[in-house]
Amino acid sequence: GGPMEVDGDCDFPQFEVASELPRHAYAGQAPAAGSKDFSKTVQREWRLLRRGLPEGIWVRASEERMDLVRAFIAGPAKTPYEDGLYAFDICLGPDYPAVPPSVYFWSYGDRLNPNLYDNGKVCLSLLGTWSGQGVETWNPSESSVLQVLISIQALVLVPEPYYNEPSYDQYRGTDEGRRASKQYNESAFLLTLQSVIHCCRNPPADFADL
């Protein structure tokens, strides 16, 4: 496969602590105070990630900046995102886990999905950036970075992303909806190819091994 296609048997570790995360989107923010509690919280997050990551998600934590994490999510099969690899930069603020983490999507200027903005914003109810009925919301005693990544993989990178727009769900099952959804998928697929090309030309340093 091409350089951005992910080989299911690759020996790239799913979770690893790197000495640094080059060009991290939140590197310019002042690091969260290194209190003992914060350090314990981060260690707990790392443990959850080390044990719980499903297939198709890779995570790099930073030894130097414990508040920063970078994740790569492979586009699931049978979706317009298949064969794409998507990078997300995550920052655990000083009030974490009382408040959800900040998450930035490396969009390369493209709007691939209703929940992933071209300016890097990730709209997810779990992050408090997306509203909807009966949705997951952040629970400081239970929610985690792992849960955020699984939600992006399962709820955002879906077979028919068109219906992720709250007002479009009413068209599900109609001819109009089917047509619009098919069109959206074709566009998302082309943008995915484009983002793969961008990414091959200018990958985050830790992307290259994937």
Image (cartoon, rainbow, N blue to C red):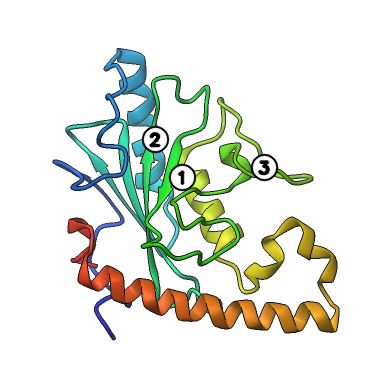
Q: Secondary structure at mark 2?
A: helix
Residue positioned 64% across, 82% down in the render: 183
Q: Nearer the viewer, mark 1 or mark 3?
A: 3
Front residue of this view, candidates 59 and 162: 162
Q: Which residue is mark 1?
A: 146
Asked if 22 appears above or below 58 in the picture, the reply is above
Q: Quadrant of residue 38?
A: top left
Q: Which mark is residue 43?
A: none
Q: Secondary structure at mark 1?
A: helix
Q: Which residue is mark 2?
A: 45
The number of discs equals 3
Q: In the figure, is residue 111 to the left or right of 12? A: right
The image shows residue 43 at horizontal and vertical percentages of 32, 30
Front residue of this view, candidates 84 and 110: 110
Q: Which mark is residue 136?
A: 3
Q: In the figure, is residue 188 to the left or right of 204? A: right
Distance Cα–Cα, label 1 vs label 2 = 8 Å
- The amino acid marked with disc number 2 is Glu
Q: Quadrant of residue 193?
A: bottom left
Q: Are marks 1 and 2 in contact (CB under 8 Å)?
A: yes
Q: Are marks 3 and 2 in contact (CB under 8 Å)?
A: no
Q: Name, please, the residue furthest toward the left.
A: 19
